[in-house]
Image: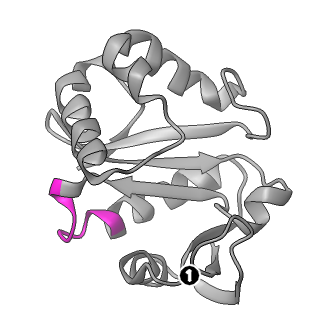
Amino acid sequence: MRLVRPDTKYKDSYLAAIREAQAEGRKTEFDFDLAENHFERFVRELNEHAEGKHMKEGYVPETVLWLVGGMEYIGRVSIRHRLNDHLLKLGGHIGYDIRRSMRNKGYGTMILKLALPKAKELGIERALLTCDKTNIASRKIIEKNGGVLENKGPNPEGGPDKLRFWIDIA
């Protein structure tokens, strides 16, 4: 297993993961339609997020990496280069997602473990991660990687309360 920059060679596996997410009724910040219909452009734009290009208003530059095993897409991690007011409450420096068919196999813990040195390379010495209070799996992933709970607060967008964790990387 390794983290790689998004690449067109993982197209079939990535699109299968998108279909899994759609079957769950999940939404992400990524454009599923663009991925399904213009995969090369989708991948190029994901990689250019690190330069702050093709970002939605209010988003910050982020490095997107995929966890792969052989030619199989397993999940993605987004490492935001800095925090804004929104990310201080929701999202934090690092967000990750494991495709449904690959969950409960330790990949969530692995993807965060592999992402932390990448965050350090970007100059992040202390990473903020958030998760829903009800997302026990994500809480365990964060804690297994050294996350220390700072506080719990209401979700400004509605829904479950948010837990805020810090991980010292330095």
Rendering coords of residue 126 (x, y %): 71, 69
Q: In this view, does 135 lie to the left or right of 49?
A: left
Which residue is denoted by mark 1 in the rendering? 147
Rendering coords of residue 107 (x, y %): 27, 63
Judge whether residue 170 can be spotted in this image: no
Judge whether residue 152 can be spotted in this image: yes
Q: What is the quadrant of the C terminus in the image?
A: bottom right
Rendering coords of residue 91 (x, y %): 64, 60
At label 1, the amino acid type is Gly
Residue drawn at x 66%, y 66% as measured from the top left: 127
Picture layout, residue 112 above or below residue 139? above
Residue drawn at x 54%, y 41% as measured from the top left: 29
Magenta stretch bounds:
101-108
Q: Does the magenta stretch include residue 20?
A: no
Q: Indicate the secondary structure of the residue bearing disc 1.
A: loop
Query: 66 or 58, which lies in front?
Result: 58
Query: 9 or 11, which lies in front?
Result: 11
Query: 95 or 5, which lies in front?
Result: 95
Q: Which colour scheme is used?
A: one colour
Q: Does the magenta stretch include residue 105?
A: yes
Picture layout, residue 38 above or below residue 88? above
